[in-house]
Image (spheres, rainbow, N blue to C red):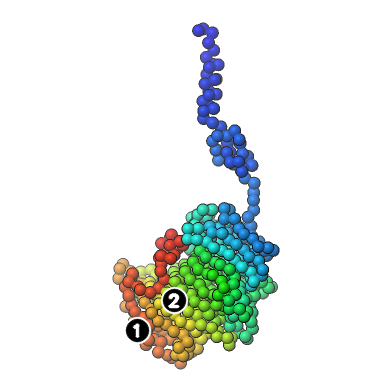
Amino acid sequence: MKNIKLPFFAAILTLGLLNSCGTDGCTDPTATNYNSDATKDDGSCEFAATEYKLSGTLAANQTLDASVVWSLEGRVIVPSGVTLTIPAGTIIKAKAGTGANASSLVIARGGKLMAEGTASAPIVMTSESDDITVGQTAGSSLNENVRGLWGGLLVLGNAPCSFSGDVTELQIEGIPASETNGLYGGSDPADNSGVIQYVSIRHGGAEIGEGNEINGLTLGGVGTGTTIDHIEVVGNVDDGVEFFGGTVNASELLVWGQGDDGLDIDQAYAGTISNSMVILNSASDHALEIDGPEGSAPGSFTLNNITLVGTNDECSATGVDGEISDYRKGATGANNNVYVMNFTDGKDIELDKDEDANSYTAGTLTFSGYEFTPATDGGSDCFTPNLTDGSIFNDKSSVGSTFEADGATICTVVSTGSNTVGANTSDFSWTYASSKGAF
């Protein structure tokens, strides 16, 4: 017994314990420093840099990989004859840029975007400053008050528009005149620019020149062959969604916290917008801004089941202007089943000038099925709405019309939660706005 070497047995015991604990290292075989002997990952894995970037003008059809985050750098153009496919759950982060170099995705006439997200896996287009990662629908570094970090999404088509001078095509705002892929307009009302569904566009609206910002979603001369539904725009500097002519139908649009107008219609847009919401905040201007034709070509829009939500602080409006809606330049169309809520006293629905009053009198601009719930504070209404004195339905023209007196026929005052018209809010449960309690 005196010859037993205790240190030797201690060494054997120590080796056994080490083997039983395993070896720390990188256990991911795709890593550049993968350790085949490691049994416990120590977080040291390193991976080869792979760049998933969209830039310039696409030369051929491209399908993105939803398992990685994509970078959008500069003005990216999908030209005629090329299709960009974005699968459900894809995250695209745009690099910062100003002026003509602002990052944006432009679907040119003849090009197609197949962006088919789902309620559980929406496509997110955001800024590189957003810390959202693959598998998430929202990050934590930005909110609805962060704007202008990149441009936006522009879709351009060959559908008819009404342009001043009766030209057949025009350069879209937000894209420099030197870029020929910025043209829109044509003679094909059924033009097809692809499918855009369950897409959330966040923190855009970079300015390319004085007073020339990019909308969250710009639709220029887009035709009825295009599918557009379940679109969210959050925190854009300029308008949320703007329709420049065209005939495309759109539904389930949600705009929150835009810096200008929520939904904007121009140049004789002749489609239908249905089941959609605009939620203003302190940066916002009008919920709706609707212009008529600019040339001789007529066009008549339709709004069905729209909800417009104002913003206030203890009964004082907090928006930049915070108006409900403004009809201008001889607007022509039908406004049906619109729910207006949370607006304070003095915020109105305006016929801007004589041509708009004339449209109303002629029956080419109509309003029906409105319901109105005033802003509340502490459970009490901020004011008692008067539907016929011009404070809500306001004809600002010099020629006059029966618009103000017709307010009681057009609209009914209802209490909070008792509305029977407007958007179905459950259709927006997938949105970032819903997750943040915006409605």
Locate the C terminus by quadrant: bottom left
Residue labelled with disc 2: 304
In the displayed image of the protein, which residue is found farthest to the top?
Answer: 2
Above or below for 31 versus 271: above
Residue at the image point whose x is 51% and y is 86% from the top: 330
- Figure check: 358 above or below 190: below
Mark 1 and mark 2 in contact? Answer it, CB < 8 Å. Answer: no
For the residues marked 1 and 2, what is the alpha-carbon distance in whole angstroms?
19 Å
Q: Nearer the viewer, residue 117 or 99?
A: 117
Residue drawn 38% across the image and 79% down it = 369
Q: Residue furthest bottom?
A: 399
**Residue 291: image location, x then y, percent:** 52, 81
Q: Amino acid at mark 2?
A: Asn
Q: Position of residue 427 (x, y in %)?
A: 43, 65
Q: x and y percent of residue 292 in the render?
A: 53, 83
Whether residue 322 is visible, yes or no, is no
Question: What residue sits 55% from the left and 77% below the top?
Answer: 247
Left or right, 387 with respect to 207, comes to left
- Callout 2: SS: strand
Q: Nearer the viewer, mark 1 or mark 2?
A: 2
Q: Amino acid at mark 1?
A: Ala
Q: Is residue 52 left or right of residue 390?
A: right
Residue 238 locus on image (x, y percent): 53, 71
Q: Nearer the viewer, residue 5 or 63?
A: 63
User: Which sits earlier in the primary sequence, circle 1 or circle 2?
Assistant: 2
Taking the spot 54% from the left edge, 31% from the top edge, the residue there is 22
- Secondary element under disc 1, as helix, strand or loop, is helix
Q: Label 1 belongs to which residue?
A: 408
Callout 2 environment at 10 Å: few (<14), some (14 to 19), or many (20+)? many
